[in-house]
């Protein structure tokens, strides 16, 4: 029986499509849900003709991610789900797997954007990499494009990481 599930969220409606499923199973199975958001800092940009670099504002990204996850965690707690959350910085697939190990998760549940063909070749698939490399079972659900009704308005938004 699964007791701790890691749920990676990327700030998109597609990423959040896993949440209704988690709500259906977490309470009855007495599971702890661990939300994670992985931040990929933008590389510094050089200003042409100068020696100045513009670093990405990781602190701002971190604050936004924490606000996002705390809002979703509050919505889950309101439905009697035991939930924690964390943010990580790095490659999404690598950090999701590291977060699962660190949290002691015995299941990873996430949505997939369902890309195929050239789009998959160009953008890759975080979900596929997690599935291939995970030490624990991975449950994937294909997003359907609708905002989950279980989340507060405005919870989503942001750049998908897949």
Image (cartoon, rainbow, N blue to C red):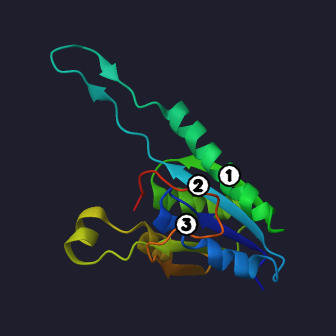
Q: Nearer the viewer, residue 72 or 61?
A: 72
Q: Where is residue 97? Give x, y as percent.
A: 56, 64
Give yes or no for contact between labels 3 and 2 (Cβ–Cβ under 8 Å). Answer: yes
Whether 22 is drawn above or below 45: the answer is below
Residue at image x 29%, y 16%? 52
Residue 29, numbered circle? none
- Tell me if mark 1 has few (under 14), some (14-19) or many (20+) residues whose alpha carbon lies within 10 angstroms of its own: some
Q: What element carries label 2?
A: loop
The residue identified by callout 1 is 71
Quick one: 50 or 65, which is closer to the camera?
Answer: 65
Residue matched to label 3: 16
Q: Can residue 134 be seen in this view?
A: no
Cα separation between marks 1 and 3: 12 Å
Residue at left offset 28%, top offset 71%: 120
Counting residues from the start of the chain, the first of labels 3 and 2 encountered is 3
Q: Residue 121 in the image: x percent, y percent? A: 24, 69
Quadrant of the frame with the C terminus? bottom left
The mark lying in front, picked from 3 and 2, is: 2
Tag 1–tag 3 contact (CB < 8 Å): no
Seen in the image, is 6 located left or right of residue 43?
right
Label 3: how many Cα within 10 Å (few below 14, some 14–19, many 20+): many
Q: Which mark is residue 155?
A: 2
Query: Toward which corner of the image does residue 138 lie, by quadrant?
Result: bottom right
Mark 3 lies on a secondary structure that is helix
Labels 2 & 1 near each other (Cβ < 8 A): yes
Residue 131: percent from left, percent from top:
49, 76
Q: Quick check: 84 above or below 42?
A: below
What residue is shown at x 67% (from left), y 75% (from top)? 22
Gap in angstroms between the C-alphas marked 3 and 2: 9 Å
């Amino acid at each position: 029986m699964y007791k701790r599930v890691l749920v990676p969220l990327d700030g998109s409606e597609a990423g959040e499509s896993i949440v209704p499923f988690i709500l259906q199973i977490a309470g009855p199975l007495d599971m702890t849900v661990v939300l994670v958001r992985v931040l990929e800092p933008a590389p510094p940009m050089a200003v042409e003709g100068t020696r100045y670099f513009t670093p990405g504002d990781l602190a701002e990204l971190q604050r936004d991610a924490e606000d996002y996850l705390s809002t979703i965690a509050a919505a889950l707690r309101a439905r009697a789900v035991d939930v924690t959350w964390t943010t990580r910085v790095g490659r999404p697939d690598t950090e999701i797997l590291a977060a699962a190990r660190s949290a002691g998760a015995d299941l990873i549940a996430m949505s997939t954007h369902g890309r195929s063909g050239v789009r998959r070749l160009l953008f890759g698939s975080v979900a596929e990499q997690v599935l291939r490399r995970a030490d624990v079972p991975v449950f994937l659900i294909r997003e359907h494009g609708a905002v989950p009704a279980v989340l507060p308005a405005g919870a989503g938004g942001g750049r998908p990481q897949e």
